[in-house]
Amino acid sequence: MKKQVLGYGLLACFYCSAFFSVANTASANISSTSLPDVDLVIEGTTIISPIDKHQISVKANHWVAIEGNRISQIGSLTKPPTAKLVIDGSDQYLIPGLTDSHVHLKTMPGIDFLDANAAHMQSAFLARQGTNYLYYGVTQVIDPSNTKDGIKRFHESGLTPDAFFCGAMPVFNGYNAQGILHKHLHHERPYYLAQDTDPKTTEAITHAHQAKQSLLRLKNDGAVCAKVYIENGFDLADNIPMVSEETLNELTQYAKTLNLPTMAHANATDMQDIAANAEISVMGHGLWNWLEEQELSNEAVLPPKVSSVLTKILNQDIAYQPTLNVIRSLTDLMVEDHIDQTEYKTVLPPWQITWYQSNAGQWFNVEMHKDWGKPPVELIIERFSAKQTNGQRVLKYLYDHDATILLGSDTPPAPTFASQPGLATNWELADMHKAGVDLKGILAAATINNANLYNLSQDYGTVEKGKRANLLLLNSNPLKTVNAYDDIDKIILRGQVFDRDTLHINKLEQRAPADQSP
């Protein structure tokens, strides 16, 4: 544990003359000891900060001063200002806090809302999920399907990363709006896109959900992007209504005039092709579903249609979230005793692990097995693994050809307990590196690339004067090992310092939900 040295306190002595009345009291004489200049100084550390997606700045033996929630000064040759708190950062590495730009903040992973204890489990989870993210160094999150009120509730839930949202723009009965009655859609999905095929409603509602109107509304609500759903069905299926080409093009072009990025839910070759043709800003998933070209997956070169889509992504500089966590967490759900891995004990209390191990907690595993036609579990794992290999190959190809890669874990992507806040982000970084993204690229994807894409670079993404003081003090060099992201000494959040150990699940108050079963 690095020593922490308190700065100079205020020493004041007041001398009063007994010969003067209160009205003529002599002025107090303040001692020569001055107030501290700043709140926090980190001394003698190595600052590692991205310059852009290609370049990283490394500055050894520097100090960083923080006043309030901002970095106020950075130096090396001059003496640092006096501070209320001084941290010795020698032999350590200071980097920007991580941004996970694809998380879902509303629901406990793997919960079954029909369970008698669901409400209690959900409440306990929501009260601590922010701390789970912080334990793994995630100081900013973006939920691509939330609202300003949802983000407000998240921030009010306890200690949390800085959170932002994208406005979800599904169509009636489309992906992310299936099962919602049209009369409830305005309330449930406030930025949905109206189409000519929709049931009749009031003229005011129809007008409010035209592409331009919905975009303006979500922009005014503070969204950092707009998310559209380009999904006609899973794998080879074609059974989900889609946004029309005309509406999609109108949306993406108008969003550009608002300086608002657009994100596409799309993970199949044909769907990502539609997204690229519409000039989307961000592919919100990796390209792992190669459809009929899956039979070519063992070839040394990528299949023609896959290659065509990737060329469009590169030519248009469409940012890319590989979201390897999606297939990884669905695969691990099928692996016997996966939840027993020790890493889960950093973010999950014993009662939650016990529930996941129970028959009730295995409900999604059973349902998914049934949906696959109940083949041997080994066959399901093999098929998932093939898709994961597709995603890894695409990521490596794009990174090797200078694509803009973003850290986005999609936590959780489904009701899978194998995708937990913070831990899934950490595993995503490791999987990205394993797929072929070098350590400079990993740092850029987790920091500056997200900040630049979502117009947050005035506050986040680098260690610079004036930036928000969301920082990580690491024991290991992140340019030497990806394991550095799990070797955190301190998290600085909005200028406040937290020893990582204090954010471990064992240090949080966790009570098992009262049994509500009959």
Image: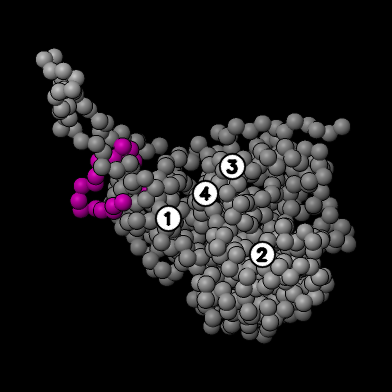
> Circle 3 sits on which residue?
157
Q: Give the percent coordinates (x, y) of residue 28.
A: 17, 27
Residue 451 in view (yes/no): yes
Which structural element holds mark 3?
Answer: loop
Q: Is residue 149 magenta?
A: no
Question: Which residue bears the numbered disc 1?
Answer: 96
First in sequence: mark 1 or mark 3?
Answer: 1
Q: Secondary structure at mark 1?
A: strand
Residue drawn at point x = 63 percent, y = 70 percent = 213
Q: Which mark is residue 191?
A: 2
The local crowd at label 1, few if under 14, some if 14 to 19, many if 20 or more residues have their Cα within 10 Å, is many
Give x and y (percent) for residue 502: 50, 36
Is residue 284 or residue 391 the one in the foreground? 284
Give the number of the mark in front: 4 or 1.
4
**Sequence-earlier tag: 4 or 1:** 1
Q: Is residue 179 left or right of residue 432?
A: right
Q: Nearer the viewer, residue 323 or 263?
A: 263
Q: Is residue 61 above or below residue 87?
A: below
Query: Mark 4 or 3, which is nearer the eye?
Result: 3
Relative height, residue 63 to residue 280 (above, below):
above
Distance Cα–Cα, label 4 vs label 3 = 11 Å
The quarter of the rendered structure image containing the C terminus is top right
Q: Amino acid at mark 3?
A: Ser
